[in-house]
Image (cartoon, rainbow, N blue to C red):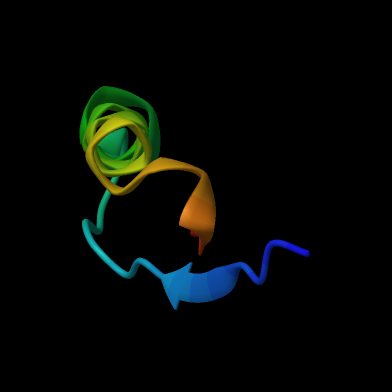
Amino acid sequence: MLTRRQLLFVQGGGAGAHDDWDDKLVESLRRELGSKFEIRY
C-alpha cells in the first residue's frame, strides 16, 4: 500500500498570483516529488 504524504504549499499573494505563479510552481513540485506526495494549495 502506498502511503502518501501531504505537503501544504503556501505561496504568492495579491491579484493573479494563484493563476500566474502558484499553479506553475505546484505542477513543478508534483513532477519532481512524484506520487508519494499529495500537494495542497
Instruction: Classify 24 as above or below 11.
Output: above
- Residue at 23% x, 32% y is 28
- Residue at 31% x, 30% y is 31
- Whether residue 38 sits left or right of residue 15 in the image: it is right
**Among the 4 quarters of the image, the one containing residue 30:** top left
Q: Which residue occupies the foreground of this view, 21 or 27?
A: 27
**Among the 4 quarters of the image, the one containing residue 23:** top left
Q: Which residue occupies the foreground of this view, 4 or 39?
A: 4
Which residue in the rendered view is the most extreme toward the front?
1
**Among the 4 quarters of the image, the one containing residue 7:** bottom left
Q: Which residue occupies the foreground of this view, 40 or 31?
A: 31
Q: Position of residue 17 (x, y in %)?
A: 26, 41
Q: Position of residue 36 (x, y in %)?
A: 50, 57
- Whether residue 36 sits left or right of residue 13 in the image: it is right
Q: Position of residue 18 (x, y in %)?
A: 37, 40
- Whether residue 8 sits left or right of residue 31 in the image: it is right
Image quadrant for the N terminus?
A: bottom right
- Residue at 53% x, 74% y is 5
- Residue at 34% x, 30% y is 27
**Total numbered circles:** 0
Instruction: Classify 32 as above or below 5.
Output: above
Which residue in the rendered view is the most extreme toward the right?
1
